[in-house]
Amino acid sequence: MHPLFHPLFINYCAYFNGNNDYFECHEVLEEYWKEIAPKEKLHPLVGYVQLATGMYHFRRANVTGAARIMEKAVVNFELNRSSEFFEYIDVDQLLHLMRNLLRKMQDKEPFAHFPLPITNQHLQEIVQQRIKAIPIMDSHFLFNKHMLRDRTEILEAREFKKRSRQ
């Protein structure tokens, strides 16, 4: 199976191009990255995670944080442009869109979404099918997802780690 047809990458594309749930993009692709290359900080999947994180921060008007992480994503994609993780994504178009977004951030223009430029028809069809299955979410929830989600599991894991160090 081509790595871009992995269910987690398809979910990433669906959240990105569908309901613009950048937080969920981050979650699913971080899981994929940890599955295949957890120690590789310059892996292309890290760049995709950074792209989604930058979009999330920009939409929330954290322009400084958004620009910083988006710049890292641009560098990552430049370094990895020949990777199989861009085989069905128009990396030149994607980089153009990202640089344009960085300019908008610097010029204090409002947030603007762009879709991932998927070039493979079959991948695009699978992503479109997945988009149809995504439940509709309130824009307030999408905008503030990192604060509104259930963090019980995360807090319990932190507390367990803290106690195990003592």
Image: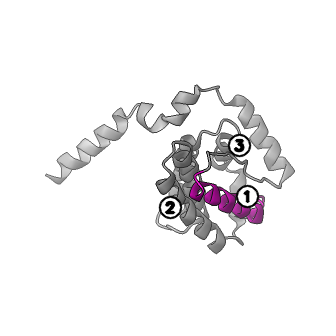
Q: Secondary structure at mark 1?
A: loop
- Give the magenta part as a residue range: 87-108
11 shown above or below 140: below
Looking at the image, residue 45 sits to the left or right of residue 116; the answer is: left
145 shown above or below 163: above
**Residue 3 percent coordinates (x, y):** 68, 57
Mark nearer the N terminus (3 vs 1): 1
Question: Left or right: 24 with respect to 124?
Answer: left
Q: Amino acid at mark 3?
A: Asn
Q: Of the residues shown, which amino acid type is indicated by label 1?
A: His
Q: Which mark is residue 2?
A: 1
* Image quadrant containing the N terminus: bottom right
Please say whether residue 149 is visible from this viewpoint.
no
Task: Point out the frontmost of discs 1 and 2.
Answer: 2
- Which residue is painted at 64% across and 67% down in the image? 77
Neighbor class of circle 2 (other Cα within 10 Å; few <14, some 14-19, many 20+) is few
Q: Nearer the viewer, residue 81 or 96?
A: 96
Give the dominant element type of the magenta stretch: helix, strand or loop.
helix
The crowding category of the residue bearing disc 1, from other C-alpha atoms within 10 Å (few below 14, some 14 to 19, many at least 20), is few
Marks 2 and 3 sit apart, C-alpha to C-alpha, by 22 Å
**Of discs 3 and 1, which sits in the foreground?**
3
Disc 2: which residue: 68
Magenta residue check for 29: no
Residue 17 - label: 3
Q: Position of residue 9 (x, y in %)?
A: 65, 50
